[in-house]
Amino acid sequence: MIRIEHVEKSYGKRPVLKDVSLEVPTGSVTVIIGPSGSGKTTFLRTINFLGPADKGTLQLDEEPIIDMKRASKKEILHVRRNTAMVFQLYNLFSNMTVLQNVMEGLVTVQKMAKKEAREKAIACLQQVGMAEYLNAYPIQLSGGQQQRCAIARALIKNPKLLLCDEPTGALDSKTSRDILILLEKINEKYGTTMLIVTHNNAIKNMVHKVIIVKDGRH
C-alpha cells in the first residue's frame, strides 16, 4: 500500500492542494480525474519530489514514513529509485535512439554494465511492442510509439509505483486507447502499481479505483 497523507501545496498565496490524502493498494491501478487547474499534476509531482510539498507524508509499502517537506536527500533518492514517471510529452532524449533512451538510467544512475543494461532494455521494449524500433530516434516515431518508449524507460526501473501524468493527453483517441490497454496489460501481467492522472474518461472502466479532484481537494 502506498500512502500519501495530508498533502498541501501553494504557489505564493494561492493554495493548489488542500489536505489531500490517498491510498494506492499494491498492484492496483488508481486514476485521478479532474478539470484543468484542479491540482492533479501538482499532486503527482509532489510524490516523487519533482515539486516540493508544503506539508504531507509519504509511505511506500511498510517502509518508514517520510515527511515530504523535510525529506533528506537520501530519502528523496530512495523514493525516486522506487518510483518512475511517464509524462504527457514523453520527455525522450532527441539525440538518443530508442534503445539508448531506455538504457540511459541503468547506465548513468545505477552504473550497470552496458551489456546487461542493453539486454534489459531490449526485453522491456519487447514488452511494449517496440522491439523493431531499437535504433530509431524519437523524431522518427509517432506519438504513440514515443509514449511506448517512455513507458519502457519507466518500467525498466521495476518501480514500486508508476506515476503517469496525462499519458494519453497528446495522442488521438485510437492511440490513446492503445496506450491505456497497454498499461492495463502491464498491470495484469506484472502487478505494477500505477497512479494515473488523466482527462480521459474512457479509462474509468479499466482501473481499480477512481479519485475525482476539484479545487485541490478530492
Image (cartoon, helix red, strand yellow):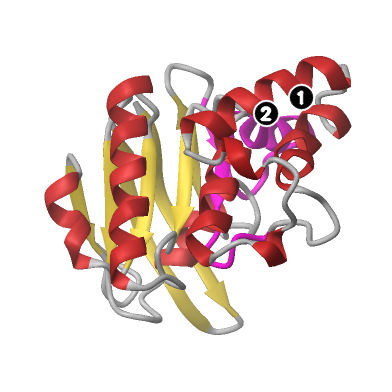
Question: Which class describes the residues within 10 Å of circle 1: few (<14), some (14-19), or many (20+)?
Answer: some
| Numbered circles on residues, count | 2
Q: In which quarter of the image is residue 157?
A: top right
Q: Nearer the viewer, residue 126 or 215?
A: 126
Q: Which of 17 and 35 is in front in this view?
A: 35
Residue highlighted by disc 1: 118
Residue highlighted by disc 2: 121
Indicate left or right for 114 with 133 as reference: right
Give the structural element (helix, strand or loop) at label 2. Answer: helix
Residue lying at 57% horizontally and 60% vertically, measured from the top left: 54
Segment colored magenta: 65-91
> Looking at the picture, how far across and down is residue 114, in whole percent?
87, 22
* Outermost residue, left side: 205
Quadrant of the snapshot with the N terminus? top left
Indicate left or right for 134 with 212 as reference: right
Indicate left or right for 198 with 78 as reference: left
